[in-house]
Image (tube, rainbow, N blue to C red):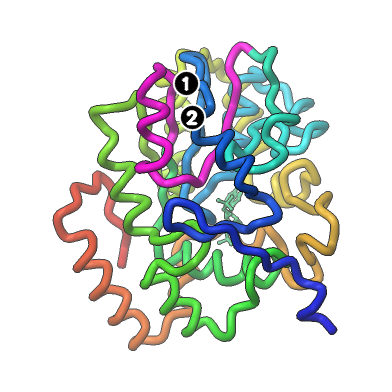
Amino acid sequence: GRAMERLEVTETFAGIALPGHLHTKESLQFATTFPFRDTDVVIVTYPKSGTTWMQEILTLLYSRGDALPAKTIPNWERAPWLEQIHFRGALRDTAAHRLITSHLPARVLAPLLQRSKAKVIYVARNPKDVVVSFYYFHRLAKFLPDPVSFDAFLQQFLEGTVHYGSWFDHVKGWLGQRQLLDIFYVTYEELHQDLRGTAQRLSTFLGCPLGPETLEALEQHCSFAAMRDNAMANYTLIPREIMDHSQGRFMRKGMVGDWRDHFSPLQNALFNRVYQEEMHDVDLSVHWPM
Ligand code: A3P
């Protein structure tokens, strides 16, 4: 029945589990030997941290506020995933600045990036909201195992036995690249609080001018409501066998602090303990309300 139709093939790579239909040995081999150009702009995130949002923001920034590319080209072609099988076909080799997306951990990807002057944008999100978003995404995405319960999924997340591995390792690994890469750190929460300010900082970082009209278009087009209704950003073009939108939406809530409606006091205490153990010596410029 239902379980038989699922695509749960898992590839293990450098100690992390990945959805096997999207990530083959060949695509991973290609990713980990990819020659970055100095002009490349690479979005790096742990899943569910604001990847799609950043793809949209950079699309609008580079189009100088023209919404046409964002409305006519799917985001996986505008900023393709380095480690996926579709990467080679989707990469726009003629663009002055190629936008590339990856969820790979620093220990795999950073050495490769260090050989170029490529710019990296790392987006992080409060892990409590990440785990909630990831849980719902597992129900939507047919290539990921159906979680038994939120509690079981939370446990796996804290152990780092979910796809793409430990959130803690991912964030710590990429934070460790501050001196080694041309890297811009931003949080999902900052995007929420001050999209305009963040877009302006991004424009400086990328050396991409941003006039008031572009800024206005960007703000309008990158709102949650606009992206939820944009088929080129909301993944509704993906076949039902891969993402079943009757099970929920990719653009689910887009909120800060939704974890408060999902965590029991016990789960929260457990999470805080692990977070403290893992992150106590990490210099985070942004602190989340935990
Ligand atoms: P929720 O599940 O909490 O709603 P990613 O793109 O890394 O997979 O992250 C997806 C998360 O980002 C989802 O979170 C999604 O709703 C949220 N998101 C995407 N675009 C957004 C936007 N414009 N504003 C706020 N949140 C957005």
Which residue is located at x 81 percent, y 71 percent?
Answer: 246
Measured in 3D between alpha carbons, the distance from the residue under mark 1 to the one under mark 2, in whole angstroms, is 6 Å
Give me the disc on residue 199.
Answer: 2
Is residue 111 in the magenta section?
A: yes
Point 46% across, 72% down: residue: 259
Picture layout, residue 89 above or below residue 245: above
Where, quadrant-wise, is the C terminus in this rendering?
bottom left
The residue carrying mark 1 has its beta carbon less than 8 Å from ligand 1: no
Residue type highlighted by circle 1: Ser
Disc 2 residue type (three-letter) = Ala
Which of the 4 image quadrants contains residue 68? top right
Quadrant containing the N terminus is bottom right
Left or right, residue 156 beside residue 8: left
Magenta range = 96-121
Mark 2 residue CB less than 8 A from any atom of ligand 1: no
Side of 236 where 119 appears, left or right = left
In the rendered view, would you say 35 is above or below 154? above
Q: Are marks 1 and 2 in contact (CB under 8 Å)?
A: yes
Q: Nearer the viewer, residue 93 or 63?
A: 93
Q: Is residue 14 above or below residue 99?
A: below
Label count reads: 2
Determine if the magenta segment contains residue 49: no
What kind of element bears circle 1? helix
Q: Which residue position is annotated with label 1?
A: 203
Q: Residue 9: which quarter of the image?
A: bottom right
Q: For the residue carrying disc 1, how many other residues have a C-alpha within 10 Å: few (<14), some (14-19), or many (20+)?
A: some
